[in-house]
Image (cartoon, rainbow, N blue to C red):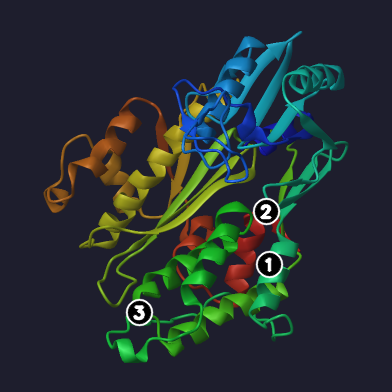
């Protein structure tokens, strides 16, 4: 989200890397360590003055030290995301993100960025990487003048394909076959010895960072990790074949001319899609200034008795994400005067959510799902109907035919 806002505002984005970050932490308790065998200690131990790598307190001590320093510079920590700090200097908004020892600074003023970097360098030993190129394994390309920023993981996905000897496999148009209905393996003798769980973990990393088009497939296949057979492995490899054909895909943020809404979401559900337990799948997408910043595909925790109920549960899950995104946007000094518009393609679900009185058909639904009504009444959430053929979140819930999948993938902002 920060990258989307920075691109919209035309900010410069610079990167810093903290050297031996954990050694900067100050310990708030007495900790002693045995000296290496090479030293003649005669029963003596050493008292630590600073944190060391390997200490369970090291990460917390470093975070506290950094927080104390940047707040002293006038930065305010986000209440919604502790990795985000903001400040207003000379009328310009300055954004700072830290993840362990990687730091991003975004601001329209190069002078303010340079001043902040100099201050950080005086306090901590750092490597100045200037304009961001890679961050947390993501390749970042930013054309500030054109208002286009893209993130991709081509190198990571290429290494994954080569590791599994799929570097020259035949590409396919979709990550999962339409109408695929697998059942869980019950016989341990049929369990595959292939690295099924390892591959799921590798794919989940790509799914949550830059490849939302893989979400539905990875979510579906992750349900068979406890006992995956050769059949499951064969279908999972189809995801790799799809990746082979879309290695150059990038998630692109384009600067809008102001016609896009600050925050807008799509929510959908696939009712009783799992033939094993008949639980439904929820999916949501959220856009900031027309750029996709948050997405998820999740299996619901209970069995829905109707498609409206499945959509209602998905809508409640999406609403919680919308509320959190609104909090982050407020910390980014965005003005939220209007309710967040969530587009839903089930009119019965919309009527149930907007109806103040409880309906007999949904009396059994858990109370925690009904909070969506309160948020609508408070003016935080607004529901709008969207035809099914325009429901972008459909790509997050189930397998789709090639043309429909490609059409919705383009609406995610993914470009080859």
CA neighbours of label 3 inside 10 A, class few (<14), some (14 to 19), many (20+): some
Q: Secondary structure at mark 1?
A: helix
The residue positioned 66% from the left and 71% from the top of the image is 160
Q: Say whether residue 359 is left or right of residue 192.
A: left
Tell me which label, 2 or 3, sits earlier in the chain.
3
Label 2 vs label 1, nearer the camera = 1
- Asked if disc 2 and disc 1 are in contact, CB closer than 8 Å, the reply is no
Mark 3 near mark 1, Cβ–Cβ under 8 Å? Answer: no
* Residue drawn at point x = 84 percent, y = 21 percent: 114
Q: Is residue 389 visible?
A: yes
Task: Mark 2 and mark 3 in contact? Answer it, CB < 8 Å.
Answer: no
Q: Secondary structure at mark 2?
A: loop
Picture quadrant of residue 377:
top left
Judge by depth and name the residue closer to the eye, 293 or 126: 126
- Earlier sequence position, callout 3 versus callout 1: 1
- Residue 157: image tag: 1
Residue carrying label 3 = 227
Q: Is residue 13 visible?
A: no
- Mark 1 closeness class: few <14, some 14–19, many ≥20 residues within 10 Å: many
Instruction: Give the mark, 2 or 1, whose residue is nearer the N terminus.
Output: 1
- Estimate the x, y position of residue 159 in percent, counting from the top left: 71, 70
Q: Mark 2 = which residue?
A: 413
The residue under the point 73% across, 37% down is 256
Residue 59: % across, % down: 53, 35
- Element under disc 3: helix
As measured in the structure, the alpha-carbon distance from the residue carrying label 2 to the one carrying label 1 is: 19 Å
């Amino acid at each position: 989200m920060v990258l989307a806002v920075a691109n919209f505002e035309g900010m410069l984005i610079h990167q810093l890397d903290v050297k031996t970050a954990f050694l900067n932490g100050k310990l708030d308790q007495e900790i002693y360590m045995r000296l290496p065998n090479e030293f003649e200690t005669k029963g003596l131990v050493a008292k630590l003055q600073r944190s060391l790598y390997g200490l369970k307190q090291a990460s917390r001590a470093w975070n506290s030290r950094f927080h104390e320093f940047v707040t002293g510079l006038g930065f305010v920590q986000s209440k919604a995301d502790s990795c985000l700090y903001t400040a207003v200097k000379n009328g310009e908004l300055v954004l700072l993100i830290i993840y362990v020892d990687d730091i991003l600074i975004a601001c329209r003023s190069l002078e303010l960025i340079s001043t902040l970097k100099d201050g950080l360098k005086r306090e901590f030993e750092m490597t100045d990487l200037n304009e961001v190129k890679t961050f947390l394994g993501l390749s970042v390309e930013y054309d500030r003048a054109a208002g286009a920023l893209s993130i991709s993981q081509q190198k990571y996905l290429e290494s994954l394909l080569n590791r599994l000897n799929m570097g020259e496999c035949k590409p396919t148009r979709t990550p999962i076959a339409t109408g695929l209905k697998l059942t869980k393996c019950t016989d341990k003798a049929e369990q595959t010895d292939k690295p099924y769980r390892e591959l799921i973990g590798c794919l989940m990393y790509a799914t949550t960072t830059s490849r939302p088009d893989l979400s539905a497939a990875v979510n579906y296949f992750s349900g068979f990790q406890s006992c995956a057979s050769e059949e499951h492995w064969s279908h999972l490899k189809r995801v790799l074949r799809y990746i082979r054909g879309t290695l150059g895909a990038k998630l692109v943020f384009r600067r809008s001319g102001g016609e896009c809404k600050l925050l807008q979401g799509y929510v959908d559900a696939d009712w009783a899609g799992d033939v094993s337990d008949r639980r439904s799948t929820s999916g949501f997408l959220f856009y900031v200034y027309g750029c996709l910043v948050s997405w998820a595909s999740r299996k619901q925790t209970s069995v829905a008795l109707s498609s409206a109920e499945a959509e209602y549960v998905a809508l409640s899950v999406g609403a919680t994400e919308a509320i959190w995104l609104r909090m982050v946007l407020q910390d980014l000094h965005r003005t939220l005067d209007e309710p967040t518009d969530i587009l839903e393609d089930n009119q019965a679900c919309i009527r149930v959510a907007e109806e103040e009185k409880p309906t007999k058909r949904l009396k059994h639904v858990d109370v925690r799902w009904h909070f969506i009504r309160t948020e609508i009444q408070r003016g935080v959430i607004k529901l709008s109907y969207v035809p099914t053929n325009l429901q972008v979140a459909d790509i997050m819930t189930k397998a789709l035919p090639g043309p429909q999948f490609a059409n919705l993938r383009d609406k995610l902002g993914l470009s080859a």
